[in-house]
Image (spheres, rainbow, N blue to C red):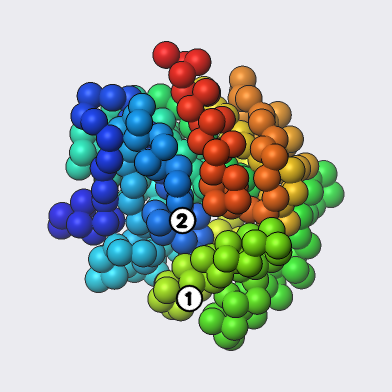
Amino acid sequence: MDILRRNNVKVIGSPGRPVVMLAHGFGCDQNMWGLVPPALAEEFQVVLFDYVGSGGSDPSAWSAERYGSLDGYARDVAEVCEALDLRDVAFVGHSVSAMIGVRAAATVPERFSSLVMVGPSPCYIDDDTYRGGFSAEDIDELLESLESNYLGWSAAMAPVIMGNPERPELGEALTNSFCATDPAMARVFARTTFLSDSRDELKSVKVPTLVLECAQDVIAPREVGAYVHAAVPGSRLITLDATGHCPQLSNPEATTSAIRTFLRELR
C-alpha cells in the first residue's frame, strides 16, 4: 500500500531543513492546524498527515481492530516516517496525538529527536490520586451520546471543546471537522481516546519534551498539564494565553512561537 496516499501526507517547506511532524487529534484532520504549518515552514520542513479514518485518508485501510488501540495510530506515524525516511523528527501531537507520539517514539526511537505535546492528557478519568477532568460516569455518558447520535453530539460538543464563545467561527470549524468524519470510525477513535490510560508510558520518554497547555481547557485542565510535566523527565511546561482545547486555532501565533523557540533551543 502507498502509505503517503493512505495517510494523505503533505510536506511543505524546503528540503534539508529540520523536520516537524504535526499530528491532529480526535475528530480532526491536518487542516485543523490552521496557520501553524505555513508559519513553521518558514524555518522547518513540515510533514502533515491524516490518521486512517480521518480527513483525506484512505478509508479502505481502516479496521476496528487496528484502530481500537492507540498503538494502531502510532503505527501510522511510524510508517509515514519510514515511507519518507525521516530522522530527527520533532513530533508535535495535539490532544490524544501527544500520547500517540509517546508510543511512536518508543517504538521507533531512531526517528524522533523531540516531542511537543499540545493539550495532552494521558488519562481522562479521575481516580483517587489523579485528576483527569472527568468521572467514569462522565465518560460513559459522553460515549453513549456520541454513539447514539454522532452528528448531534458533534454539534453540541464542538463549541464546548473549542471554547471562545465570542468567536463562534472556531466552534463551527471544529463542528464541521467532526461531522466530516465517518461516524463508525469516529466511534472507535472516541473510545480509544477517552478510555486510554498512558500514564505509565510517560516516564519512558527519552527525548526533550515541551508540554503546551492552555490557560483554560475543559478537556485537559491545568492539573493534567502539571501531571504530564512532572511525569516526563526533564520536560518543559508552558501555559499559553489561550482558551479552549485547540490553541493552534484560538492563538496560532503563541502556539507557533512556543514550538519554534523550543526547537531552536535544541539545536
Q: Compared to 52, does 44 lie above or below?
A: above
Question: Element under label 2?
Answer: helix
Q: SS for tag 1? A: helix
**Horizontal and vertical percent position of residue 210:** 57, 29
Quarter location, residue 214: top right
Instruction: Tell me the amino acid under the disc marked 1.
Output: Cys
**Which residue is pictured at 73% across the width and 35% down the height?**
226
Residue 211 visible? The answer is yes
* Quarter holding residue 184: bottom left
What residue do we see at 26% from left, 66% from top? 58
Q: Quadrant of residue 15?
A: top left
Instruction: Residue 110: tell me if it is visible.
Output: no
Amino acid type indicated by mark 2: Met
Q: Residue at x 54, y 80 (%)?
A: 150
* Dot label at residue 179: 1
Q: Residue furthest right?
A: 128
Return the x and y of residue 246 as percentages of the image width and height. 59, 52
The reply to whether callout 2 and callout 1 are in contact (CB within 8 Å) is: no
Residue at the outermost bottom position: 148
Q: CA distance from mark 2 to mark 1?
A: 13 Å
Which residue is at the front of the view, 34 or 77?
A: 34
Position above or below: 133 against 146: above
Image quadrant holding the N terminus, namely bottom left
| Location of residue 66 in the rendering, given as x and y in whole percent from the top left corner | 37, 61
Outermost residue, left side: 1
Relative to 137, does residue 16 appear above or below in the rendering? above
Q: Quadrant of the C terminus?
A: top left
Q: Residues within 10 Å of mark 2 (few under 14, many from 20)?
A: some
Would residue 94 be found to the left or right of residue 244 on screen?
Answer: left
Dot label at residue 44: none
- The crowd level at tag 1 (other Cα within 10 Å; few <14, some 14-19, many 20+) is many
> Which numbered tag is attached to residue 32?
2
